[in-house]
Image (tube, rainbow, N blue to C red):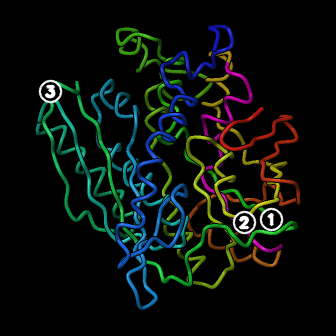
Amino acid sequence: MSESAKSQYDKSGVSSQGAETALSGLLKHVLPTRGFSNRYPLAADIGYFANVIDLGNGEGIAFGTDGVGTKIMVAELLNRYDTIGIDCVAMNVNDVICVGARPVSMVDYIACSHTDPEVFNQLGQGLAEGARQSNISISGGEISQIKEIISGIDLIGACIGHVSLNKVNTGKDIKPGNLIVGLASSGVHSNGLTLARRVLLGETIEEQKSRVNEYDQFLGQTLGEALLEPTKIYVKPVMEMLDSGIDLKAMVHITSGGFCNLNRVESDDIRFVIDTPQPVHKIFNLIQDRGGVSEAEMFEVFNMGTGFCLVVESTNELEAITKICKTHNLPCQVIGQIEGCQGKEVLLPQQQLTGKGSRFT
């Protein structure tokens, strides 16, 4: 790829294309391991937001893992770590609920070059708050001091959930005519921070330190505060919907890849038409304007205001969904519908973008 053709994300040091190539090399060895544990087979294909282990007797354990990425660097710039644990919990539980599972417990892994007691105290505060919002326990973890490898801290989690096997949901029953409901995000969440930091704060650590506390009139807060806004946790409203019997055809966490995450559902020959998305947060407008980031790349890298999507049969479910979201102070709205097509894709008519796989053009 020539320098002029490179995306802004590539220039910031994150290669989406490279990640896909690396993943294919990994999967050719990992996929055959499905046959190594015949007593506890997997109930879904690798590639969805979480997988489910069949324990027998109709019961399953959902399992997933994720971290906070370079959002931890914003916490380091601000010397404020009390919310980053919320992000770690959120990124894990929001994936686990996608398969219809109720999150149960999580463990954390902290790789570090130091063991500052106050930093770890604040990390614990965030993890506990995320657990409270998700109704889960933090059942253990690991601190690994690897100064030779890492400078600062990295925070990763792994979460399990419970689901009956007949309730496992991977979006295989989506049909044309179904509706897409979008649940609002709280901000950037924990994806695309490498690009966001580079655009808003500068390319060097020195620049980022000098700008992180800069007040932005357009945002109405400092740049650092806007970037550190915790990821929204969707567990309580989504679990309430499932418990009340609302038929959710699919639940999709909008993370890296943006609306292209909808393409991860099992159904084929469908098009996700997103014609009335949630309002775009100001911070995304700022990133796009300052960084000269294309519309396609913005929708690939960021959630753009919609953090979670539900696919429902028809308008019959909307009143109950809206009522539940209102009790949780969570903006929701119909953002589009399902059409039939050859293959699978996401269409954003207003932006004239089509997403196949994980890329928009």
Q: Is residue 222 magenta?
A: no
Indicate the secondary structure of the residue bearing disc 1. Answer: strand
Residue drawn at (60%, 49%) of the image: 254
Of marks 3 and 2, the one in the foreground: 3
Residue drawn at (35%, 34%) of the image: 72
Between marks 1 and 2, how big is the CA–CA gap? 6 Å
User: Circle 2 sits on which residue?
Assistant: 311
Q: Is residue 208 above or below residue 223?
A: above
Q: Is residue 311 above or below residue 15?
A: below
Q: Are marks 3 and 2 in contact (CB under 8 Å)?
A: no
* Residue span colored magenta: 293-314
Residue type marked 3? Lys
Indicate the secondary structure of the residue bearing disc 2. Answer: strand
Indicate the secondary structure of the residue bearing disc 3. Answer: loop
Q: Earlier in the sequence, mark 1 or mark 2?
A: 1
Q: Is residue 322 above or below residue 80?
A: below
Residue drawn at (67%, 8%) of the image: 4
Q: Is residue 316 above or below residue 274?
A: below
Q: Quadrant of residue 341?
A: bottom right
Q: Are marks 1 and 2 in contact (CB under 8 Å)?
A: yes
Q: Is residue 301 magenta?
A: yes
Position in image of residue 3 (x %, y %): 62, 8
Q: Quadrant of the C terminus?
A: top right
User: Circle 3 sits on which residue?
Assistant: 147
User: Circle 1 sits on which residue?
Assistant: 179
Q: Characterize the local packing of mark 1: few (<14), some (14-19) or many (20 or more) Cα atoms within 10 angstroms.
A: many
Position in image of residue 308 (x %, y %): 61, 55
Q: Quadrant of the N terminus?
A: top right
Using the image as rendered, state which of residue 49 and residue 113 is in the foreground. 49
